[in-house]
């Protein structure tokens, strides 16, 4: 069975390899589900793994199959599987159970373990392969009506979690009713966060470096949201003109943006940080001003990584709502298809060089 993999720790080692065929018998207690992979979305994480910035191989292997944004179709189910049948469309979650109390209650994305397990990222093989098998716990059903955009569910789940975390934390305020939000970054995650906030009825300003007109700016405006280029309008200036921002969703991975967001956040506001900055960059910030604003303004900042099953299920609901409220919008994100696993070099080239790409994805099996 073909798969795309890297040798962890070795830069630019991505290659095509062969893996043993999976079987539902690989999963205990009759809970196995065998899935044919149809599409796999790829992003900066896959590029960084190929750059050997992080990621370890599963036990017994010297390679790691990449790809964590899956979409597939059920081929076979174990005798103790209910709710899914051959032919159903599905997406698999990414994080797998560790040993902490958070893992034991199903919130694997909140683990306190030093070692974490993520399919396609760390210590577990990913989905850039022809078939995979997994436990019912980690498989989420996707309606056939969403089959053309189902590969977007994993990044949607990340946005869902970050926004839901903000709402959960803000229950401390008893009557918090956010009206205005800013999203910083207009890549796939930032666009999906813009969508979800619009579906919740907020006025949204999405900021990115690139000046309009671009596909990204058009996608923002198609949601009746506002697009602003930080080349012309800083986040602080945007807050003064379009705020106060009750929520700021950071989706850049740039540490300076995180601190700028802390300054721009409105009183009683929530800042959601989702970007990962892999370097050791030093920045100078107005620390006293930020601290004073947070204390006197009752502000809160929360980091949010990955998502558990709950947020995948919420993502299915919002993707269906999006198709009703903004027909065809999700499909416009799927800009750069790659035909077949064997074209993995083109996949990496698009991730590295194609500045106009919103979402690069691999068509593993085009028969949907």
Image (tube, rainbow, N blue to C red):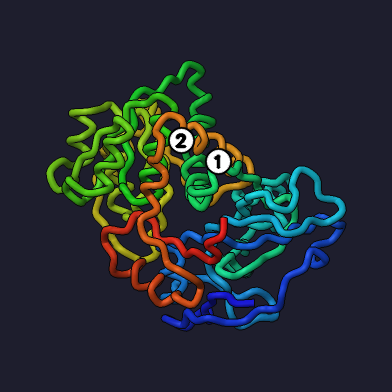
Q: Which mark is residue 295?
A: none
The part of the image, by quadrant, that contains residue 117 is bottom right
Position of 58 with respect to 166 (left or right) is right
Q: Secondary structure at mark 1?
A: helix
Secondary structure under the numbered disc 2 in the rendered image: helix
Disc 2/disc 1 C-alpha distance (Å)? 9 Å
The image shows residue 184 at horizontal and vertical percentages of 31, 44
Q: Are marks 2 and 1 in contact (CB under 8 Å)?
A: yes
- In this image, 272 relative to 135: left or right? left
Who is closer to the viewer here, 302 or 118? 118
**Mark 2 or mark 1: which comes first in sequence?**
1
342 or 99: which is nearer to us?
342
Q: Which residue is mark 1?
A: 145
Residue drawn at x 25%, y 34% is: 226
Q: Which mark is residue 323?
A: 2
Camera-nearest label, 2 or 1: 1
How many numbered discs? 2
Q: Viewed as shown, does residue 150 lie left or right of 235?
A: right
* Badge 2 density bin: few <14, some 14–19, many ≥20, Cα 10 Å: some
Report x, y in % for residue 185. Answer: 31, 48
Figure quadrant of the N terminus? bottom right
Q: Relative to the observer, which residue lies in front, 123 or 262?
A: 123
User: Height in image: 54 above or below 61?
Assistant: above
Work out whether residue 133 can be spotted: yes
């Amino acid at each position: 069975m073909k798969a795309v993999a890297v040798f962890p720790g070795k830069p630019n080692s991505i290659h095509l390899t062969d893996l043993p065929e999976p079987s539902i018998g690989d999963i205990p207690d009759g809970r196995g589900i065998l899935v044919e992979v149809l599409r796999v979305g790829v992003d900066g994480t896959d590029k960084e793994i190929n750059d050997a910035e992080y990621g370890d191989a599963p036990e017994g292997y010297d390679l790691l199959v990449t790809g964590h944004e899956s979409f597939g179709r059920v081929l076979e189910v174990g005798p103790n599987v209910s709710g899914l049948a051959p032919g159903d469309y599905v997406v698999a979650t990414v994080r797998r159970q560790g040993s902490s109390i958070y893992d034991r209650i199903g919130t694997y994305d909140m683990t306190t373990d030093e070692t974490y397990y993520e399919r396609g990222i760390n210590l577990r093989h990913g989905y850039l392969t022809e078939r995979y098998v997994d436990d019912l716990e980690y498989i989420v059903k996707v309606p056939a009506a969403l089959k053309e955009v189902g590969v977007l569910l994993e990044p949607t789940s990340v946005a869902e979690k970050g926004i839901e975390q903000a709402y959960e934390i803000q229950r401390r305020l008893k009557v918090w009713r956010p009206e205005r939000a800013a999203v910083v970054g207009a890549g796939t995650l930032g666009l999906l966060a813009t969508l979800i906030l619009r579906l919740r009825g907020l006025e949204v300003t999405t900021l990115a470096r690139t000046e309009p007109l671009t596909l990204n700016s058009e996608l923002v405006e198609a949601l009746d949201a506002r697009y602003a280029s930080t080349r012309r309008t800083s986040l602080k200036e945007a807050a003064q003109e379009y705020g106060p921002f009750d929520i700021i969703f950071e989706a850049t991975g740039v540490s300076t943006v995180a601190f700028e967001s802390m300054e721009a956040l409105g009183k009683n506001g929530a800042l959601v940080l989702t970007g990962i900055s892999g370097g050791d960059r030093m920045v100078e910030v107005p620390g006293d001003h930020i601290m004073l604003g947070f204390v006197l303004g009752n502000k809160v900042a929360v980091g949010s990584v990955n998502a558990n099953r709950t947020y995948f299920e919420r993502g299915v609901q919002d993707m269906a709502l999006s198709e009703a409220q903004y027909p065809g919008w999700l499909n416009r994100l799927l800009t750069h298809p790659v035909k077949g696993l064997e074209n993995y070099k083109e996949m990496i080239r698009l991730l590295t060089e194609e500045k106009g790409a919103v979402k690069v994805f691999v068509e593993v099996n085009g028969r949907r």
